[in-house]
Amino acid sequence: MPNPASSDIAVIVTGAARGMGRAMTLALAGAGVRVAAADLASSKVAVHEVLDTARKQGWHERITPIDCDIAKWQDCESAVKATIERFGCVHGLVNNAGIAVPDEELASGRARRRRFYEHEANSWRR
């Protein structure tokens, strides 16, 4: 079976507004992949900055923004449905979203480093 062209591939990138999610969204779109850029509704300004960057390169039509809090199952289902409505399919997921603890919180003692298995289930889900 032949491999699909990159323009036939559609993926969801979570945490698409900033950092690695932003970089992956732009790199995938630049490679011709169609991207559902999923992030929190409160990140609309940052998502639009991603779209503006893509627009300057002529890639903006390959990116569709989607409001999604990955800690909410309904948002995840809606993100998949919206991606299928826009692109007709979903081939992959870049599961990048997460909450980072800033270094200043670690330095001040307000937060401490923990191994992943030391987190409570609810905080891990968040």
Image: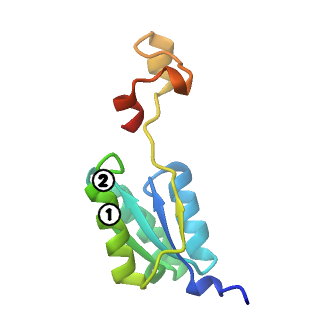
Q: Amino acid at mark 2?
A: Trp
Residue 76: horizontal and vertical position, in percent?
Answer: 34, 59
Residue 3 lies, with reference to residue 81, above or below; the image says below
Q: Quarter of the image holding residue 52?
A: bottom left
- Which quarter of the figure is the N terminus placed in? bottom right
Q: How is the image coloured?
A: rainbow
Q: Residue at coordinates 59% horizontally, 70% vertically from top-left?
A: 28
Q: Residues within 10 Å of mark 2 (few under 14, many from 20)?
A: few
Going 58% across and 61% down the picture, which residue do you hit?
A: 24
Residue at screen point 53% across, 25% down:
117
Whole-percent x, y for residue 112 in the image:
49, 15
The picture places residue 41, in percent across and down from the top left corner, at: 26, 55
Q: Which residue position is annotated with label 2?
A: 73
Q: Can you say whether 113 is above or below 4 in the image?
A: above
- CA–CA distance between discs 1 and 2? 6 Å
Direction right: furthest residue: 2
Circle on res. 60: none
Q: Are marks 1 and 2 in contact (CB under 8 Å)?
A: yes
Q: Is residue 45 toward the left or the right of residue 24 in the image?
A: left
Report whether 92 appears left or right of 74.
Answer: right
Residue located beneath label 1 in the image: 77
Residue 94, image quadrant = bottom right
**Residue sitting at 48 percent across and 61 percent down?**
13
Q: Is residue 121 left or right of residue 96?
A: left
Q: Amino acid at mark 1?
A: Glu
Of residues 124 and 6, the one nearer the viewer is: 124
Quarter that holds the C terminus: top left
Q: Depth check: give the residue in front, 74 or 22.
A: 74
Closer to the camera, 13 or 25? Answer: 13
Secondary structure under tag 1 reads: helix
